[in-house]
Amino acid sequence: MKKLISLWQGHLPLRDAFWDWVVFGGLLVNVTTSILLLVLLIYDQPWAALIVGKGCSLPYNLVATVGVWRSAMRHDGPAMQADAARIATLILMTVLSLT
C-alpha cells in the first residue's frame, strides 16, 4: 500500500512509475481483467463482466497515469524523457482502458 501511495503522490522515480506500474503492472491488470470479462460474458454474466472488467482496470489505469504524470513533474533528468513517459502513458492506458 505504501508503494501505491508513493505512486499516487508522484514520489517514485519516473523510471519505476512508468515501467513497473504502467507497462508491466498495466499489462498484467488489463490482460487479466479482459480475460475475466470474456469468461463472464461466455457464462452470460454481463453485469459481473462489466464490474470485473472495467471496475478493476479503470481505477488502476487512472492511478498509474496520475502517478507517472506527477513523477514526471519531479523528474530531474531531461524534460524529453518526462514528456515521452507522459505521452506513452496516456496512449497505453487509453488503449488498455478501451479494450
Image (tube, helix red, strand yellow):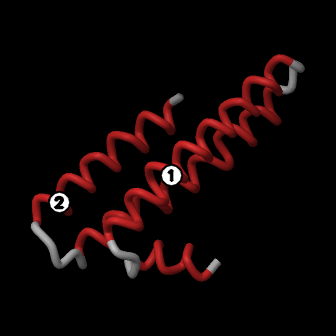
Q: Is residue 74 left or right of residue 57?
A: left
Q: For the point 41% across and 57% down, which residue is it?
A: 19
Mark 1 to mark 2: distance in Å?
20 Å
Is the residue marked by circle 2 packed among few (<14), some (14-19), or many (20+) residues within 10 Å? some
Q: For the point 74% across and 41% down, which residue is it?
A: 51
Quick one: label 1 or label 2, which is nearer the N terminus?
1
Instruction: Locate residue 28, reporting x and y percent.
Output: 60, 45
Q: Which residue is mark 1?
A: 61
Instruction: Locate residue 37, reporting x and y percent.
Output: 73, 30
The N terminus is located in which quarter?
A: bottom right
Residue 47 numbered tag: none
> From the viewer's perspective, is residue 42 above or below residue 88?
above
Secondary structure at badge 2 equals helix
Amino acid type at image mark 2? Gln
Q: Which residue is mark 2?
A: 81
Q: For the point 66% across and 32% down, which residue is it?
A: 34
Instruction: Locate residue 21, reporting x and y percent.
Output: 48, 59
Say which quarter of the image contains residue 12: bottom left
Amino acid type at image mark 1? Asn
